[in-house]
Amino acid sequence: MIELQKLCKRFPQNSGQPVNAVSDVDLVVPEGKICVLLGPSGCGKTTTLKMINRLIEPSSGKVLFQGKDTADMDPVALRRRFGYVIQQIGLFPNLTIEDNIMLVPRLLGWDKKKRHTRACELMEMVALDPKRYLQRYPRAMSGGQQQRIGVIRALAADAPVLLMDEPFGAVDPINRGQIQDDFLAMQRSLGKTVLMVSHDIDEAIKLGDLIAVFRQGRIVQCATADEILANPADDFVASFVGQDRTLKRLLLVQASQVAGIKQTLTATLDSTLSTIFGVMDDNDLLHLTVVDKQGLPLGYIRRRDAKIGKGTCQDHLLPIPITSLADDNLRVVLSRLYEHNMTWMPVVDAQGCYSGEVSQDYIADYLNSGITSTPPIDLIPADKEPAANVAQAAPTHN
Amino acid sequence: METLRQTLQYFWHNLPAILVLTRQHLTLVGIAVGVAVLVGVPIGLLIVRFKPLAGVVLSVATVLLTIPSIALFGLMIPLFSLIGQGIGAVPAITAAFLYSLLPIIRNTHTALTQIDPGIREAGRGIGLTFSQRLRLIELPLAVPVIFAGIRTAVILNISVMTIAAVIGAGGLGTLILHGIGQSDIRQLINGAVMVSLLAVVMDGLLQSLEHVLTPKGIR
C-alpha cells in the first residue's frame, strides 16, 4: 500500500552544514495494517510521515502509494487521498463541526445532502449525537470529543490511508485508553492502512501491527510488537522499549499460546489413580485435570493423592476454582492467578472444553523460549535484498 | 459659562455647514482608509507568504508613520504639483493612506502569523491549497485582528485629517484653523469636539461591524 524506498531528508543547519534528518528509510506498510513510527523526539519519525503526503519534500528516495511514485502526483490531490490527524487536532474554529468534517468532501464536489448523511454516519461511528453536536463550534467540545472529530474528519472522504502524528498525545490518560480502543475497533472494521507517529511504547504495542523504531533518522528495527519486545535489535531499542519489556509482552501473548507449548494431558473420572500417577511421574506433573466425555474440566487430582494409588479419580477429585479463556492475555491470566493464590489454572476454549493449562512456570518458559506471538509481516519486497536495518525473523509459533 | 453658551449657539446656527465639513472629513478618511485596506491587506498576505519581505515592508510602513503629519502634508504639495494637484483632497488622502498602511499591514501580518500552527498544518495536511486556506480558514480567523488595525487607522486619520485643512483639503480641520486664525474659540471648540465625537462614534460603528463579520465560532 505504502512503500518507502531509501527515503532521505537533509536540512541545512545554521552552520551551513546539511544534516540528515532522515536517512535511507525503507519501509513497507501492507494494506489494512497499522504501522507505528516509534522513537524519541528528533529521531525523524514526523519528518518521515510528512514526506508521505509531501508536506515535506524528500531530498532523495521514493514514496510509493499503491505502487505509484507520489513525486509524480499533485500534492494537493495526494493529500486529499490521505486522512491526516495531528496532535494539536487542528479543527478550524471558525467552522461548525459539520463543516469541519465535510470540508474535504465539499472541495471534492460532494453535494450537500450526501455530505450531511456522511457527517451523521461518521458522528455515530464515534458515538457523538449528530443532532446535538454537528452545528456546534469546536470550542464547545471537550478535548476528547475534538480528538474524535479530528479522526473522523480524516475519514470523511473515505481516504484509504490515515497518517497520524501523535494523534492521541494531547488527550488525558483516562480518555486516551478509550479513544485508542475505539480507534482500533474502527480501523479493524474499516480496514484502513494507518501510519502513526508515536513516542509512547505502550501505544505502539496496543495499536501497532508493525512497529518501526527510529533513531537519529534511521529505522533500527521494524517488526511486530512482540518481536521487538522479545528480541530488541540493539541496546537502544532495548532501553527505549523499557526494562520491563518482558512484562509488556504479557499483553500480547494469549493463554492458549502458553498452553500450546506443553502436551495436553487429561484423565477421566474412571481412570485409576495408579495409571494417572504413572502419567504424572513420566511427565513430571504435580497435578492432572480430569475431564468428562465432552472435554469439560471437572476437577483435578494432586500428585500426592495419586501416589496412594488406590481407587479412581472420582474419590480424590478436587474442584477447580478458576479457569482461563483461550484468548485471555497473560496479564489477565497472571492477575487472576495471583488473585486466587494459584500457581496454575486450566485453559478452556469458547465451548468450555479443556485445552491445556497455564502456570507461572509455563509463562516464564514461554517468555524465555524465543517464540513470539505473531509472525513478522513480510516487510521486504520479494525482488529485493533484505535491508540491513530490518531485524531477522525469530522462530515463530502460533 | 458664557463661552460654552456661545459655542453651543454657534453650533446650532452653523449646523448645516458643520455637517458638510463632517461629511467631507469622513469622506477623506474613508477613501484613504478604504484604499489602504485594499492595498494593505494583500501586502500583509504577501509578506506572510514571502517571509523575507516582511522585515522590509514593515520597516518602511513604520518609517512612514513616524513622519510628522504636518511635514508629510507639506511634502505632498510639491509632489502633487507635478500633476497639478498640489493642494486639496488628493495630497490629503494620499498622506492619510500612507499613515493607514502600517496598522493595516502589520495587523494583517500579525493575525495570519499568529494563527495556531496546528490549524495551518491541518489545513495543509488535509489538502487545502494556499488560497483555499486563506479564504476558508485563515482570513475569517484573522478578521478581528485585521479589523483592529482598520479601527486604529480610522481613529488615527480622523485626527490627522484635521491638519489637511492646512493644504486646503477641507474637513473639520477648517473650523479649527479658522478658530485659530480668527481667535474664535467657538469655532475651535466646535471643530475639536466634532473630531473627537467622530472618532468615538466611528470606533463604535466599526466595532459593531467587526462583531458581525467575526465568525461565530471565535466570537
Image (spheres, grey):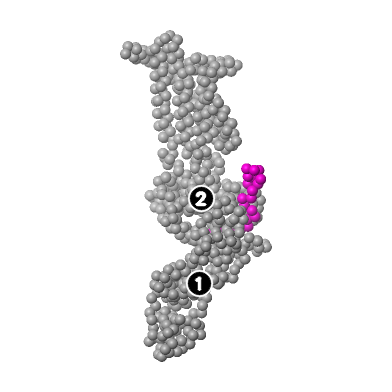
Disc nearest the viewer among 2 and 1 = 1
What's the magenta region? A10-35
Task: Return the x and y of residue A148 as percentages of the image width and height.
Answer: 45, 52
Q: Quadrant of the C terminus of chain A?
A: bottom right
Label 1 sits on residue = A364
A34 falls in the magenta region: yes
Q: Are marks 2 and 1 on the same chain?
A: yes
Cα separation, mark 2 vs mark 1, equals 40 Å
Type of amino acid under label 1: Ala
Check the image and name the residue furthest to the top.
Answer: B182
User: Are dots 2 and 1 in contact, CB under 8 Å?
Assistant: no
Give the quarter of the image for residue B179: top left
Type of amino acid under label 2: Ile
| Chain under disc 1 | A
Q: Quadrant of the N terminus of chain A?
A: bottom right
B82 falls in the magenta region: no
Let me know if residue A238 appears in the view. yes
Task: Return the x and y of residue A365 as percentages of the image width and height.
Answer: 52, 73
Residue at point 54% right, 16% down? B74
Q: Which secondary structure type mostly characterizes the magenta part of the structure?
A: strand
Label 2 sits on residue = A86
Asked which secondary structure carries label 1, the reply is helix
